[in-house]
Image (cartoon, coloured by chain):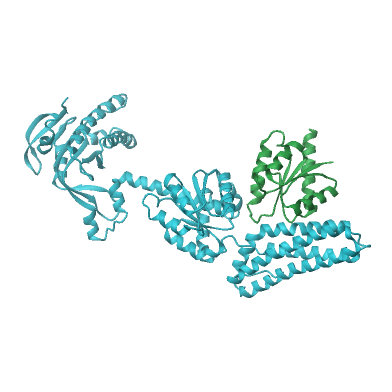
Chain colours: A cyan, B green
């Protein structure tokens, strides 16, 4: 048989291949009928088996014709190869008994007694083998049949494989390696109106270690997705009633559901629909018939992307307050209006600074790494306190720690919360010093300063975003700390007035504050019992 | 005479193959789905199993796993027979516990040599 080559006028070549297949299939039937006629008169013992060959031949002929007919709509080589590939299982199953019975009859029929029957049988066998070779040669390259997203498949497949395997193992061992994918975990939903497809997919995924649920139609799928957690949805496009598009559109327009990755399941003739779905937000697509290796690779890649996405979301939330992180997704640093939108005025917030006293001196005594380890211990404890009181950590600057109460969501008790936290900060330091007694350095001491007033808060700049505060209030809070006393909490008059009934203070000053002149300040001692 | 259990749902295929195997001197037992295959493996204690992979009720992979997991049947060699186009099928069949693999259409001499090899290996093991 002539090898089918891409590039040359494939329409003509494929016509030739089609012709070849169809001729072989009909020749087989003609030979078998001849044999049957002969057997009727000469050797009736063999009629049963010859009839079996004939019925297998007819089945094969029908299968091949089905492929040829389907290809008349979309006359292309790749498409035809895909058709043959998807029917290869059935084609092989039909050729199998033809070859088997022929070989058996050749053993039974005496060549000398029935030379004609023997000769025809040999012809049937040769034709069947040739037809088998033709079918095996119509192989589909792995990334085809669809040229439109071909590059994408290759890229995604290799990405997926690279996630799991060292590159030197690829590509020779791609096949072998990807079969040994580590057991997977995750909950999948398979949505397909055809029972056989649902069974096939769920059976395969279960073998891979997934939890699999199935839905028969779009409506059932949506109901299940709303009531149950899924890591991934496999969605058939063509379904009666609510189709795959509608389900996808509903999912992607729902704030709570749009993060669930969806992989579309498509038939061969639905490639433009697939492109449409990907534009609508589908993560990927799978083509019927399912190829195990591609199936595995796509599922792992999608789940891996989901995990990475969740991880980066979590990281982002560590850096920015949640509502700011949400807004920032649409932030354009070049747009002046956006900058305005992301910096907001707050009428009254409480700002706290804390600083380690003599830290610079201390840092000459121990190694930088030891120092950072200790600092990490202190700041981690402060982070826990900030979370406990529902306050916002703004940043650390060297050994200084800055936080605020009353933003980004305003709260009436911002000053009380910050005061309570400050008292606990001092306790944390005392506790850590006890723990670190055996260590070869002096005790840590901190100064804390608090002030209440208006600020502007937001995110500015173009990169390395952080949520920050600006205004005189910040400067005064910082001065409260820098002009404070070790192991004491110094608060301004403004903060004092807000919480003087709930906490015990000791008046200090008035003292000279750099750039501010004389100010009356207070040392926060404890909460009133 | 070695006893072979043939698990195959396609009537024409099991009729043809079982007759050909009988001619070669094997005792052949047939099961038409995976569940029956597992049961027959327990009841008949065949010397070897030929397992089609796409079977109704319980597919060949599952049936193989079950046979290989049960104490009384785990030593029976299994050859997977598939008509699948999937290149991963061979590895999957082996991963499920099949001892060897062959594709349809069946080339009898090739299949027989695989059967003989596994039966010899089994006898050698049994003699020890």
- Which of A240/A120 is in front? A240
Residue A95 occupies quadrant: bottom right
User: Relative to A127, is A151 on the left or the right?
Assistant: left
Query: How many tags in the picture?
Result: 0
Can residue A207 be spotted in the picture? yes
Quarter of the N terminus of chain A within the rendering: bottom right
- Which of A323/A399 is in front? A323
Residue at screen point 85% across, 49% down: B23
Quarter of the C terminus of chain A within the rendering: top left
Q: Position of residue A187 (x, y in %)?
A: 49, 45
- Which of A425/B107 is in front? B107
Q: Position of residue A240 (x, y in %)?
A: 51, 58
User: Relative to A335, is B76 on the left or the right?
Assistant: right
Q: Position of residue A11 (x, y in %)?
A: 61, 74
Residue at screen point 41% across, 55% down: A250
User: Relative to A449, is A433 on the left or the right?
Assistant: right
Residue at screen point 69% across, 54% down: B83
């Amino acid at each position: 048989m002539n090898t089918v080559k891409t590039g040359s006028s494939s329409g003509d070549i494929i016509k030739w291949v089609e012709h070849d297949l169809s001729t072989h299939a009909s020749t087989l039937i003609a030979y078998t009928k001849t044999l049957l006629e002969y057997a009727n008169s000469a050797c009736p013992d063999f009629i049963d088996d010859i009839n079996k060959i004939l019925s297998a031949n007819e089945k094969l002929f029908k299968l091949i014709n089905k492929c040829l007919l389907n290809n008349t709509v979309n006359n292309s080589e790749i498409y035809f190869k895909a058709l043959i590939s998807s029917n290869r299982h059935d084609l092989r199953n039909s050729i199998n008994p033809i070859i088997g019975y022929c070989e058996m009859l050749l053993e039974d029929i005496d060549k000398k007694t029935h030379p004609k029957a023997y000769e025809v049988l040999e012809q049937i066998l040769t034709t069947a083998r040739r037809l088998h070779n033709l079918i095996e040669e119509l192989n589909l390259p792995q990334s085809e049949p669809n040229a439109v997203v071909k590059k994408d498949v290759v890229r995604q497949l290799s990405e997926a494989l690279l996630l799991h395997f060292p590159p030197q193992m690829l590509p020779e061992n791609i096949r072998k390696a990807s079969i040994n994918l580590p057991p997977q975990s995750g909950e999948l939903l398979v949505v397909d109106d055809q029972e056989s497809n649902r069974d096939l997919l769920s059976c395969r995924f279960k073998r891979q270690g997934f939890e699999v649920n199935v839905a028969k139609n779009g409506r059932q799928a949506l109901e299940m997705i709303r009531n149950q957690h899924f890591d991934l949805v496999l969605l058939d496009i063509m379904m009666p009633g609510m189709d795959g598009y509608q389900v996808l559109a509903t999912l992607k327009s729902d704030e709570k559901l749009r993060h669930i990755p969806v992989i579309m399941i498509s038939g061969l003739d639905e490639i433009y629909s697939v492109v449409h779905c990907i534009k609508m937000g589908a993560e990927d697509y799978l083509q019927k018939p399912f190829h195990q290796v591609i199936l595995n690779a796509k599922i792992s890649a999608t789940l891996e992307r989901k995990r990475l996405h969740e991880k980066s979301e979590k990281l982002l939330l560590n850096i920015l307050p949640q509502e700011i992180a949400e807004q920032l997704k649409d932030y354009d640093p070049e747009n002046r209006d956006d900058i305005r939108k992301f910096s907001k005025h707050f009428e009254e917030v409480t700002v706290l600074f804390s600083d380690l006293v003599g830290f610079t001196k201390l840092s000459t005594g121990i190694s930088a790494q030891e120092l950072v380890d200790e600092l990490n211990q202190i700041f981690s404890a402060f982070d826990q306190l900030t979370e406990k009181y529902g306050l916002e950590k703004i940043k650390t600057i060297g050994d200084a720690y800055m936080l605020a109460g009353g933003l980004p969501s305003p709260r009436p008790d911002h000053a009380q919360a910050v005061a309570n936290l400050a008292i606990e900060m001092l306790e944390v330091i005392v506790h850590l010093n006890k723990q670190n007694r055996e260590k070869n350095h002096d005790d840590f001491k901190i100064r804390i300063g608090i002030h209440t007033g208006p600020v502007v808060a937001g995110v500015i700049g173009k990169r390395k975003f952080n949520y920050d505060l600006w205004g005189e209030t910040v400067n005064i809070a910082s001065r409260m700390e820098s002009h404070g006393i070790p192991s004491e909490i110094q608060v301004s008059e403004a903060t004092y007035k807000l919480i003087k009934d709930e906490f015990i203070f000791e008046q200090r000053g008035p003292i000279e504050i750099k750039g501010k002149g004389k100010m009356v300040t207070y040392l926060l001692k404890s909460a009133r019992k | 005479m070695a006893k072979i259990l043939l698990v195959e749902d396609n009537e024409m295929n099991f009729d043809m193959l079982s007759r050909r195997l009988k001619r070669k001197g094997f005792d052949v037992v047939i099961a038409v789905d995976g569940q029956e295959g597992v049961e027959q493996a327990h009841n008949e204690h065949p010397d070897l199993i030929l397992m089609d992979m796409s079977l109704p009720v319980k597919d060949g992979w599952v049936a193989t796993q079950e046979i290989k997991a049960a104490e009384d049947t785990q030593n029976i060699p299994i050859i997977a027979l598939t008509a699948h186009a999937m290149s991963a099928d061979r590895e999957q069949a082996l991963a499920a516990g099949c001892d060897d693999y062959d594709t349809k259409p069946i080339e009898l001499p090739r299949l027989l040599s695989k059967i003989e090899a596994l039966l010899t290996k089994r006898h050698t093991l049994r003699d020890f």
